Amino acid sequence: MSKKHPGVYLRGKVYWIKYSRNGRPFRESSHSEKESDAVRLLNLRRGDIARGVHVTPRIGRVKIDELLEDVASDYQMNGKRSAKDLKFRLKHLLPFFGGRKAADITTADIRRYIVSRQTDDDDGTGALNGTVNRELSLLRRAFTLAVQSRKLITKPHIPMLAENNVRTGFFEPEQFNAVIKHLPQHVKPVARFAYITGWRANSEILPLQWRQVDFQAGTVRLDPGTTKNREGRVFPMTQELRALLMDQRAKTETLQRQQGALNPWVFMYAGRPFKSFRKAWNTARKAAGLPDRLAHDFRRTAVRNLVRAGIPERVAMQMTGHKTRSVFERYNIVSQGDLFDAARRLDAFRGTISGTVAHETVQLTKGASPK
């Protein structure tokens, strides 16, 4: 033990420190052959203890791999839908940061990671800012959980990129009808349901069961915990939606008579529920001459239709399941047709004004006072 610096001692060529917290002794390597480095580390540990910061020698040794595993456990524990994307995101994070001590990762390291992702993706074109941000969010969550669990004392600043790849696609009626013509019979009612309600096809429409459809009350509902924001939802039946569901109900009853068994699903293929129609959708949109259209564009289309039908924004948000006004407003897209309609309204308005002005001018010419 050093006489000049109690708590610092030499083990081989490396200096170690010794300190106690709540009466429990701890020993920690300074990983340095300089006594001054050990003294600096000891003072840091004593200062943390004095401030009430939970300190153990492991704080400086935990690796980023362990923190990312903690995120995976957190996602699974909380049933987050993004858990299925973890493997893809880790495919890029682990090769760059894996094996490193979390405490050694700095903001400069994270900036280097961002540059590497922007310039070297699998296809050589670089990842989109939105993709990189999802990966950075995962890294940010890892450090946040580490601080909460006292595996780390601090976390680095993680800069996020500006995203300008927000989609603005939606369907005009003729475009929707063009795609519908090329969809298989079992997919058409799903697409029509999505076009009316704006609900998410794979996670909210395809899992629908008849217990969620109430023809007497005229509603379709989603149970709490089954939606993206975990809240329940109710959509009132329009005439078109009721007709669609009644047709599906007739198909279900026919199938039940043939099979002799109850079937709880609203949408089926070959007597069974299906989880996706991606392949059929890709074929239909290309055949319709709309290769850039996504099924998610139904969501934007429904929002736009609800607003233009004069439905109050608060009610429309409840029907489509938008929790924040910012996202709802982003989906409330103005089309070229809307702009031309605005121009026609302006022409009509100016025509009325021009007529009034002309009438007043004639009256003034005749020497009469305008009204």
Image (cartoon, grey):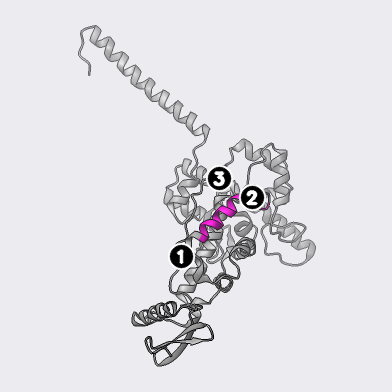
What residue sits right under mark 1 in the picture? 156
Q: Is residue 205 left or right of residue 273?
A: left
What residue sits right under mark 2 in the picture? 244
CA neighbours of label 1 inside 10 A, class few (<14), some (14 to 19), many (20+): some
Answer yes or no: is residue 237 visible. no
User: From the viewer's perspective, is residue 62 above or below residue 165?
Assistant: below
Residue type at numbered disc 3: Arg
Specify the quadrant of the image occupied by residue 18: bottom left
Position in image of residue 202 (x %, y %): 64, 57
What residue sits right under mark 3 in the picture? 167
Mark 3 or 1, nearer chain start: 1
Position in image of residue 192 (x %, y %): 63, 47
Foreground: disc 1 or disc 2: 1
Q: Residue at x 67, y 51 (%)?
A: 247
Residue type at numbered disc 2: Leu
Q: Main secondary structure of the magenta part?
A: helix
CA neighbours of label 2 inside 10 A, class few (<14), some (14 to 19), many (20+): some
